[in-house]
């Protein structure tokens, strides 16, 4: 792939390209990394994109943030689904995040999928139940949640995007 600032993913053998993320997007990613890393169990690791999540020979995704089992990381990426995949929407990625990636991660058995919309701001937490994602939390603006899965973390959508880091 060219090193041109774009993100390339492979989904069912089809190449999907996304432009570089905006500063608001990256702020949310950085704050998620900080919040998730603080209480991360030692058998898991929190990493930002770009890290390849290899779901099949023809499907390699790059979520914005992943929490994976340390034992499943290889030299080239994460083999199999993460414990948690987080996507921070951008105008150009919203549909891919909501439909395509969600379906592929659900099919692969990723237990937790979170969706952040930094423009509103909102946080939706999905968990795999009987093979399908169900929404466990839906937060907007200043609402806080003490999330228990995949491990305890306290988050607020405003706290992820506020330019001064104020909760």
Image: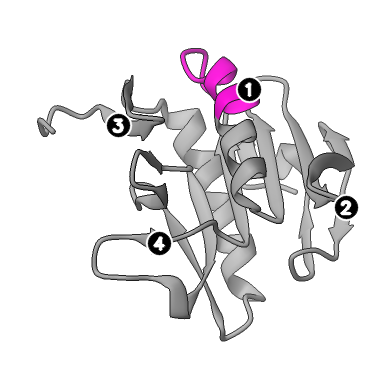
Task: Give the CA distance from mark 1 to mark 4.
Answer: 22 Å
At mark 2, the secondary structure is strand
Which residue matches tag 4?
78
Residue visible at 32% across and 21% down? 19
Which residue matches tag 1?
99
Picture quadrant where residue 3 is located:
top left
Please report whichever mark, 1 or 4, sits nearer to the chain's N-terminal start: 4
How far from the left and from the top, in percent, is residue 7? 30, 31
- Mark yes or no: residue 105 visible: yes
How far from the left and from the top, in percent, is residue 88? 57, 34
Residue visible at 62% across and 36% down? 161
Kindly report which numbered mark, 4 or 3, lies closer to the viewer in this rendering: 4
Disc 1 to disc 4: CB gap under 8 Å: no
Crowding at mark 1 (Cα within 10 Å: few <14, some 14-19, many 20+): few
Task: Give the CA distance from mark 3 to mark 2.
Answer: 31 Å
Is 44 drawn above or below residue 8 in the view shown? below
Please report whichever mark, 1 or 3, sits nearer to the chain's N-terminal start: 3
Which residue matches tag 3?
7
At mark 1, the secondary structure is helix
At mark 4, the secondary structure is strand
Q: In front: 140, or 162? A: 140
Task: Give the CA distance from mark 1 to mark 3.
Answer: 18 Å
At mark 3, the secondary structure is strand
Which residue matches tag 2?
145
Please report whichever mark, 2 or 4, sits nearer to the chain's N-terminal start: 4
Which residue range is magenta in the image?
90-100
Disc 4 to disc 3: CB gap under 8 Å: no
Q: Image check: 126 left or right of 146?
A: left
């Amino acid at each position: 792939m060219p090193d041109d600032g774009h993100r390339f993913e492979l989904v069912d053998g089809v190449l999907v390209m996304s432009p570089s993320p905006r500063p608001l997007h990256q702020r949310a990613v950085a704050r998620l990394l900080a919040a998730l890393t603080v209480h991360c169990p030692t058998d898991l690791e929190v990493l930002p994109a770009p890290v390849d999540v290899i779901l099949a020979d023809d499907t390699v995704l790059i979520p914005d943030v992943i929490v994976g089992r340390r034992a499943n990381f290889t030299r080239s990426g994460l083999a199999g689904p993460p414990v948690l995949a987080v996507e921070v929407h951008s105008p150009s990625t919203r549909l891919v995040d909501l439909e395509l990636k969600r379906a592929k991660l659900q099919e692969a058995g990723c237990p937790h999928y979170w969706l952040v919309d930094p423009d509103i701001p909102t946080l939706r937490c999905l968990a795999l139940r009987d093979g399908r994602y169900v929404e466990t939390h839906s937060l907007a603006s200043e609402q806080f949640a003490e999330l228990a899965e995949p491990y305890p973390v306290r988050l607020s959508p405003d706290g992820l995007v506020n330019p001064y880091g104020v909760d």
